Image (cartoon, grey):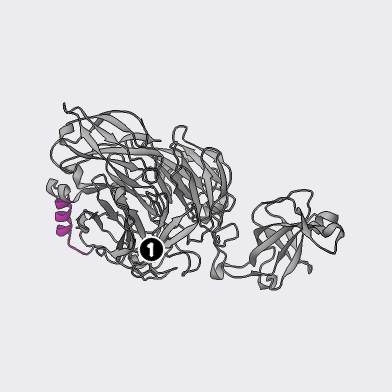
Amino acid sequence: MNAPAAVSFAQQQYHAYEIAQPWYKATYGSWSTLVLPPQFRVNAIHASLLHTGKVLIIAGSGNDSDNFKAGTFKTLLWDPVTNTYKLIPTPDDMFCGGHSQLPDGKLLVAGGTLRYEVLGAAVTTAGGTMQVFNEDPNKARTVAKGTVFTAPDGRQYTSDDTLVLGPAQKVRVTDRRAPGGFRTVVRHTQQAVFVLAVKPGKGQNVKVSTRFQISGLSGNDANTLYGMTGNINMGDQNFEGIKASYEFDPVSEQYQLADPMQYARWYPTLAPLADGKVVAVSGLDDTGAILNGQNEIFDPATKKWTPGPNRYFATYPSLFLTADDKLFYSGSNAGYGDPKKGRTPGLWDLAGNTFQVVPGLTRPDLTETSSSVLLPPAQSQKVMFMGGGAPGESAVSTDRTAIVDLNSADPHFVPGPNLPGGDTRYLNSVILPDDTVFTTGGSSDYRGKHGSDILKADVYHPDTDTFTPAADPTVGRDYHSEALLLPDGRVVTLGSNPLFGNKQDVGPQFFEQRIEIYTPAYLYQQGSRPSVTGGPQQVRLGGTARFSTSAAGDIAYARLMRPSSVTHATDVQQRSVALPLTRAADGSGVSVTIPRSSGLVPPGWYMLFVVNKAGVPSVARWVQVS
């Protein structure tokens, strides 16, 4: 499809001529490139479609430590219809946080970056995790960011975050030797914080358990509030997460503060639940350690977080809500943590915190930076796994795909067709209204190294279990890239953050700020495009609603499509739900029935598409399901 770089000028000219021909577009679709005005260019780390039809593009600090140090955090709101842009004030560094659509149409954004990683020779100052204890039962204590901890030998270390410790607890315990058979003991409260030595060099390493005094305290305060650690060294220092959470309101176009999470998270997944709540899973905490299964649940009615069932996952796990209200973990993840822990696919029942392993995935060692998608229609309950690579910065990747039928009494993966682009990491997959899946981009090596971006796109057909070629993109997409469906039926691709931009594997990393838009072949078919011209905006589970349409007799089916919220090849929001329909006898419209299951149709805003017998979808009409 795309002419190689080394072909002649004449061949390039012919290629440009060919891909512009109507027959070509009607077969393969076409691409267009959008270059934003300089003042609106951001590093697209996260992208979410809102029910206003606009796309929220979150950069935060954008994987740029200079932006982080300067407190420069960005969010861009883009209207694809008018092609207008608006920068949104961004209150925290949401870089590498998580996000989920809420029932009222707001977007929940939680977690992000507290501190950038420092690796290898760049580590010049010893650091480590300090456990801070409060033994005073009479008062809570706040330990501010920048607090100085002093060792008995005078060495000093500063904290990089603020802690709030509740008062210690007085507890009665049985003691036959005490009067009355009971005695009161005080149980401390405890939190961890990352600290850095005030002075550089290995001389600041701490290898044995040591008690540290907190600067400025004396008397009882100094005795009851203190730090303990025996592990401060010159090793790699990971990214650290934050606890902050916000709702973005598509109407006011502003972030609104929600209660903070109980645990800081960097690289978390936020997955919708059947009752409209959201579970936050995994992530690196505020000391740079991967959370050991401490998950939590957000209630949009109270804006508060409560503890969820404890289960360990690798970061950015792909978790799909099933029709029976469970979460299916496909095995796709973004790494971090033990390479042999938290990566096994299975069905997670949050109510009882049970986990049913789903076997059969070939090359289970190659699940990082893979792509997973709930195949259309969602009633089939089939999930497809695509590509992936070995843990860490390995160059090893795979073209393997696999499919699991969750409706089966014995769910297990079976092999699917190999990816046409070959071994692929960071593949983006987008459900289309015609019940196909559009796949695009990725790279064969870690973060596009050695010029390994794959300029290829394809369409997967679940009904035949085959791929067919699509027109190829001209912009490479690998790490920190996204793709999502627009209400007009097109697909937008954003971002990409390769380590190097050439086959010599030299030079600095850069960030791709061009947007490329794919127009599928179905929008180049002859004949009129169907349209939805009227109908309710609110629909209920199990209810039936009538919509006015053009040429109702030519409409083959209708789909409810949940809008994407995607980052790091992870999009657990998108799904396409088949709607039984009847056509009005006079050809004026169709009536559709919404499934009763909130596991199949979690509450929120959806795009309603009608698709004609030629496979051409309408422009979507937004409806809210409750």
Point 34% across, 47% down: residue = 575
Q: Can residue 20 be seen in this view?
A: no
Residue at image position (27%, 52%) is: 438
Position of the C terminus, as image quadrant, is top left
In-image side of 141 versus 548 (left or right): right
Spot the residue most to the right: 179
In this figure, which residue is indicated by the disc labeled 1?
358
Front-most of 246 and 510? 246
Relative to 436, 10 lies left or right: left
Q: What stretch is highlighted in magenta?
A: 6-20
141 and 90: which one is in front? 141
Residue 259, percent from left and from top: 58, 43
Residue 219 left/right relative to 30: right
Tell me which residue sits at (13%, 40%) in the image: 526
Disc 1 crowd rating (10 Å Cα; few below 14, some 14-19, many 20+) is many
Direction from residue 219 to residue 482 in the image, left or right: left
Residue 280 on the magenta segment: no
Task: Answer whether residue 118 is visible to the viewer in this image.
Answer: yes
Q: Nearer the viewer, residue 542 or 207?
A: 542
Q: Does the magenta stretch include residue 8?
A: yes
Q: Position of residue 174 (x, y in %)?
A: 78, 60
**Image x and y of residue 126, in percent:** 64, 67
> Is 365 above or below relative to 63?
below
The correct choice, above or below, for 45 with respect to 545 in the image is below
